Each structure stands twice: as structure tokens, then as C-alpha cells.
Amino acid sequence: MIYGAPVTETPVRPADPETIASAGVILREGGLVAMPTETVYGLAADGLNPAAVARIFAAKGRPADNPLILHLSEAGELEGIVERPPQLAFELAAAFWPGPLTLVLRRRDVVPAIVSAGLATVAVRVPAHPVARAIIRACGRPLAAPSANRSGRPSPTLAAHVAADLDGRIAMIVDGGPTEHGIESTVLDLSELGPRGGSGASGEKGGDAPLLLRQGAITREALAAKIGAVRDAHGEALARSPGLRHRHYAPRAKVELVEPAMLQRRSRELAGDGLRLGVIDGGPGQGEDPQLSGVSWLRLGSTSQEYARSLFAALRTLDELSVERILAVTVPELGIGRALMDRLRRAALG
Ligand code: TXA
Ligand code: MG
């Protein structure tokens, strides 16, 4: 053992068949396993076992009023979990599953109330990551899985991020390498639609269009192209996604958002004030300023997609470097840029 190295208690295992089989056993016995998905790492428990689900809340320090997503291995399992899904749910499932779209539907009684924090609804998705689906199949149950970070920390996009937050608190971490999207699934509420759902269902109670509760890896544009109208959640509607009320993605340093055109001026100002500065420069950005030294300048690629993939890791890196201020470049609110700006704003709220 290397003197001074952190004691690691939770094994981090490569995602091979043996690991997947033992993850299945741990989950069946009510234990917690962190697994890769195509969005971020998830902290999984048997979603039909209330004691196992309670362990998720304890390990993360998650507020009890913040509901979890159930992960299914295929869309065919949907009807066992939710009550009378509208036709639109099947259309969306056919178009986007497996993949990073979460649907909020009416919960059946087989789903323990703790999964959805007592709400009458439950959030479900079929992840696209082959390791996640193999682990769900190995357990043989739907898996409740929030992002595998301590509550209030950035979502984990590497197994090492999970270990940093949850070592010693969970039974196993399955390492599937870096996650593809780096930003969480899009959450769409269909729970108040009539049997048909969608724009054709007007006249039924709440039957106009589904409600977009969280911007995520499936873009609003892709949803609208498939199903027409999507309503954005404002004010009261946001209360329906309790996770959005809580503190989120907060690095230790204060985060300031800056338009690309203002980045040079603002970074020189702050560095001139003698602040230990970190810059998150992605999308159009501008690249490192040769006049600045001693600034932790992270260039996260040239597209919003690349920026989104690396944002959470960058926030963690800058925390480790103990910078005092983070300047993060904004991107246009189009496509994945909407979800990215949503996460940047939350980080800036602190
Ligand atoms: O990509 C993802 O969605 C990742 C991976 C692991 O699947 N999971 C994830 O879970 O981000 P979590 O718990 O960090 O975020 C779930 C979000 C929260 O904002 C929560 O409030 C919302 O979904 N949610 C869950 N169940 C809900 C429900 N019944 N009604 C409304 N919102 C719900
Ligand atoms: Mg989360």
C-alpha cells in the first residue's frame, strides 16, 4: 500500500460478465451497485424492494422528497410498472428507447411509494448502455437509479467520480469508462394526458401536450419533431419535478457565466484581482489566453456536445485544484445547448 493513499473500501470492477453476474446477486440481496449508463453513472438498487431503495437515499444523502427513476431492460416491461400509459408513451418509447428519455407516468401499486417519494407517478426509462441493461437483466427487476454522486455534487461521468463520492457507502462500482452524453436524461411528464395523449387529445383533462420537466440528452427539438407540441415547465409545474427544487451541481468555488466575447476581458480582470481562477471554455469559446499565467484553463472541445460531455468532470477537476472562482463560457440555447445551459445556471446558483 502506498503511504498516504486513500483507503478504498468499495471495489471498482471492469464491466465483464463475471462482474455483471455478481452485481445481479448484490442487487437481488438488496445492496447498492454503481453502474455506467449512456448519460451519467447511476446508483442502482432493486426498484421493487423498499429497504434497498431506502439505502440509495442514505448513501447519497438525498432528500426524501426527491423521487427516483426506474430503469427497465426493455420497453415491454412498461405496462407492469405504470397504470394505463397513453398511446403517446408507446410512440415515444418506440422512437427514443433504449436511450436518455425518462417518462413520468402513473405508478402501479407494485412500485413501492419510496421510489417516487410518495407521488402517484413514477419516472421510467430504458437505458441504452449495454452494461446497464445487462445488470438490469442480471437482477431481473427494474432498478431504481439516481445519478451516483453525493447529493449536491456534480453527476459522475467516470467510475473514479463515483468512488470519490461514495467509497465505503456502496457494495460495488462497475467501471464502463467515460459516459457518452455526460449530461442526464430528458424528463417528460405524460401523467396527465388522456388515453391517446399528444396534440390529438385536446379536450381531455390536461390532454394537450406533455410537460418537459428536465432538459437533457434528448433535445427538445428531437422531441418536438417526433410528437409536435411539448410544454415547458414553469413555476408551479416545476414543483412536480422535486429534484429541480434542490441544490444541484455546486462546485466549491463560485461559478460565473460569461459570453464567449467577454471571456478574455473578464478572465484578465479576475486574474488581475489575484483570484485563483479556473476557466471552463467549451463550444465556440476562444482557447487559452497566452497573456494569463497561473489560470487553470480547461478547453472542453469545440461543440456543445463535447462541452456537455466534459462539464461535470471539469467542475470536479477545478474543485480539486481549489480555485476560488470559475468562469464558464455560455453556449447558444439550441439542441443539447439547452440542457448544458440549464446545468451551467444551476452550478452558478451555488
Ligand atoms: O440520465 C439520468 O436520468 C440518470 C441515469 C442514472 O439514468 N439518472 C438521474 O437521476 O439523473 P436523478 O435521480 O439524479 O434525477 C432524476 C430526476 C430528478 O430531477 C427527479 O426529481 C425527477 O427525475 N423525477 C423522478 N421521478 C419523478 C416523478 N415521479 N415525477 C417528477 N419528476 C421525477
Ligand atoms: Mg442527480
Image (tube, rainbow, N blue to C red):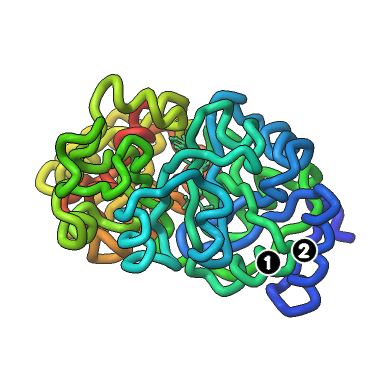
Give the quadrant of residue 99. Answer: bottom left
Q: Which residue matches tag 2? A: 23
Residue 54 as seen in the image, left or right of residue 284 = right
Q: Residue at x 50, y 61 (%)?
A: 126
Quadrant housing the N terminus: bottom right
Label ID, residue 135:
1
Residue 154 appears in the picture as rendered: no
Quadrant housing the C terminus: top left
Residue 122 image offset from top left, x and y in percent? 51, 40
Residue 134 as seen in the image, left or right of residue 123 = right
Q: Residue at x 50, y 30 (%)?
A: 120
Residue 232 image offset from top left, x and y in percent? 21, 37
Name the kind of residue labelled 2 in the image. Answer: Ala
**Closer-to-camera residue (31/326):** 31
Q: Which residue is at the far right?
A: 1
**Closer-to-camera residue (246/191):** 191
**Closer-to-camera residue (8/253):** 8
Q: Which residue is at the far bottom?
A: 17
Residue 256 image offset from top left, x and y in percent? 29, 33
Residue 155 appears in the picture as rendered: yes
Q: Residue at x 48, y 55 (%)?
A: 125
Above/below status of 158 relative to 45: below
**Label 1 near label 2: C-beta < 8 Å?**
yes
Above/below status of 14 relative to 219: below
Above/below status of 312 relative to 25: above
Give the quadrant of residue 274. Answer: top left
Residue 248 image offset from top left, x and y in percent? 45, 33
Q: Which residue is at the far top?
A: 236
Dot 2: few (<14), some (14–19), or many (≥20) neighbours within 10 Å? many
Label ID, residue 8:
none
Q: Earlier in the sequence, mark 2 or mark 1?
A: 2
Q: Residue at x 34, y 45 (%)?
A: 188
